[in-house]
Amino acid sequence: MISIYLKEIRSFFSSLIGYLVIGVFLLFIGLFMWVFTETSVLDYRYASMDSLFSIAPLILLLIIPAVTMRSFAEEKQKGTLELLFTKPIEDWQIIFAKFLAGLTLVLIALLPTIIYYVSIYQLGFPKGNIDGGAVFGSYLGLIFLSIVFLSISIFASSLTQNQISSFILGAFLCFIFYLGFSYASSLPIFFGTTDHIVEKIGMEYHYQSISRGKIEYRDLFYFISLAGFFYWLTLVSLSKRKWA
């Protein structure tokens, strides 16, 4: 499993993929936080990282499917997936190694944003006038969002050997589970009756809940369960290919 994990990490950084993902993520976050007047912290005149935590999920929603679209689609395309099955390793270990490699890349991309927190901490009046609990909760929420996005995107990659199709399907499913249910809850058929229940099915509701700094077990359980569900679907998808 470790060898597959290291192979995935090397594939990220032996080409432009890893550097491009990290660079694009930090560029967009930096522009929204410090340059664009509508979201700039400098124009807020309030020590907050809300602009980062509102735009980051949307960027990750596109970047993570782009990173993981090669996971199994490329293996199928090159005919190397069968070689993985012949190794003395379980299917769940193969999936977990690829998942862990993707999560490592996401964490590396998030790590430099701590500089923004330090900057805002220093710029606050008085110094340190920033809600540390909300910042911690938002970072935790981003990590759990990334875990689910990775599980969804790897599942999408396991369904096809076309990387573009994998990216489109992964991004679509991530969008549906992050924002789709929030939009659906405002439809006339749900509004005023079951809108709150429909909204809770989506990730945005639970992400916003954690971002307030109040970490509840039900929110963590939701993310873990959803990630586990798509992890299981990936196992089923790979098992069907082996049976075939």
Image (cartoon, grey):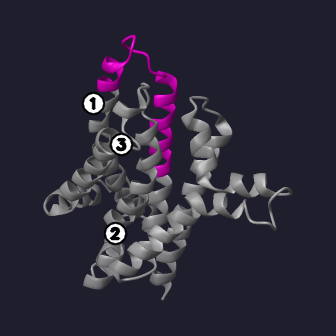
Q: Amino acid at mark 3?
A: Thr
Task: Give me the C-alpha separation between circle 2 and circle 3.
Answer: 38 Å
Question: Mark 1 highlights which residue?
Answer: 115
Question: Mark 2 highlights which residue?
Answer: 71
Q: Earlier in the sequence, mark 2 or mark 1?
A: 2
Q: Residue at x 61, y 64 (%)?
A: 180
- In the rendered image, residue 136 lying in the magenta stretch gets the answer yes
Q: Earlier in the sequence, mark 3 or mark 1?
A: 3
- Residue 228 located left or right of residue 194: left
Residue range of the region highlighted in magenta in the rendering: 118-145
Dividing the image into 4 quarters, which one contains the N terminus?
bottom left
Identify the element where label 1 is drawn: helix
Residue situated in front as seen by the camera: 203 or 24: 24
Identify the element where label 3 is drawn: loop
Q: Amino acid at mark 2?
A: Ser
Q: Residue furthest left?
A: 14
Q: Earlier in the sequence, mark 2 or mark 3?
A: 3
Question: Mark 3 highlights which residue?
Answer: 37
